[in-house]
Amino acid sequence: MLAPLPDRRVIAAVFPADTDEARALRAVPGEPYGVLRRFDLLGARDLSSESLLLAELRRVHLLGWLNPEYLGRDGTKRPCKGPNCGGVTLETNLGITANGYADPDFHGWEVKQHGVGSWAKPKASRVTLMTPEPSGGAYVEEGPKYFVRTWGYPDQLGRADRRNFGGIYRVGGAANERTRLRLVLSGFDEPTGRFEGDGAVMLVDGDERVAASWSFAKLIDHWKRKHAKAVFVPSIIRKDPSIQYHYGSKVDLAAGGRFSLLLKAFAYGSVHYDPGIKLETVDSVEKLKRRSQFRIDSRYLDSLYESFRQVDLLA
């Protein structure tokens, strides 16, 4: 038996098959969780992880407008400032601490929020699927600072001593005008859905030099862990008298995120690379901010999963 804790420690216990403990565990059906089965030992034994998730999302919806904040590992809440506060605030109110771990957020579910503008006329928005660092190319071989110096560009707002690397990159699209890089999918056969073990998603320049790459081996591990089950929660924002978020009552539940479906979405151009990397000099010291992210338009989320359905939390 494995019991993961919030601080990523794991308590393990082994019981011989003929003991009372082993017989008691076998008597509880549990919930499938990959090759394992999940048991809730905290009292909510009649609730599946889906029921627990929906109950918590309903509670968060009924809280109304919420101040942007994030939950530290020490359990304290702090104000959140920046473009990612919608997702962080939702996680905070679900009891999820801020971290960069590539594991599901809530009882095996990956939690994603996306802005919709208004409840009356919701609009499509870009959803961040994952933020893995490159595993190959010049970004790794020469370092991310070299990457930004070589393919980045001066800050477009005129801020001195700063170079950025941004833009939208889609498989099959033209090279970015500023960075001169294009996105390539290597090792995937779209008609059959088969992929090679040494395949990769790559940023290449006009000389076919690989500026950065993400191996299938790295992406598949990240995708399978984070997107076996996912929930997508709509949100709206108001800025007067202060920035606050409200989370919707209709959420999308997704399951069965197969890697071949992700690669097919790359091939179609619906999943794209949308980085936000910057290198700036502050007090004569170079500081690098890394932000590699793969995103998708919310209209195409259902193409990534075997099962995708909407649930009304108030029904």
Image (cartoon, rainbow, N blue to C red):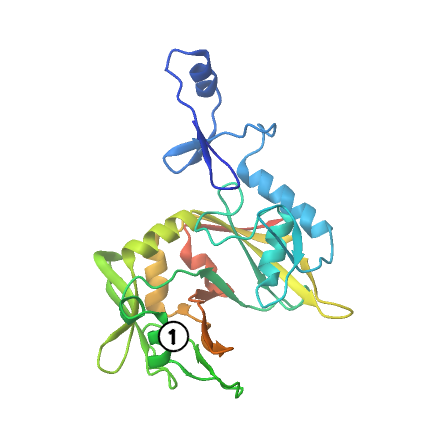
Identify the residue at image location x=63%, y=46%: 75
Identify the residue at image location x=46%, y=57%: 302
Which residue is nearer to you in this view: 155 or 127?
A: 155
Taking 175 as reference, is 84 left or right? right
Percent from the top left, x then y, of residue 32?
43, 34
Considering the numbered disc 1 on the image, is that residue within a helix, a strand or a loop?
loop
Q: Exactly how many numbered labels are in the figure?
A: 1
- On the question of residue 90 being in view, the answer is yes
Taking 239 as reference, is 225 left or right? left
The image quadrant that residue 275 belongs to is bottom left
Screen quadrant of the C terminus: top right
Percent from the top left, x then y, of residue 175?
33, 82
Percent from the top left, x then y, of residue 168?
42, 76
Q: Classify 298 as above or below 76.
A: below
Extreme residue in the front direction: 284
- On the question of residue 313 being in view, the answer is no
Which residue is nearer to you in this view: 313 or 169?
A: 169
Q: Amino acid at mark 1?
A: Tyr
Percent from the top left, x then y, of residue 164?
44, 79
Query: Pointer 1: what residue?
Result: 169
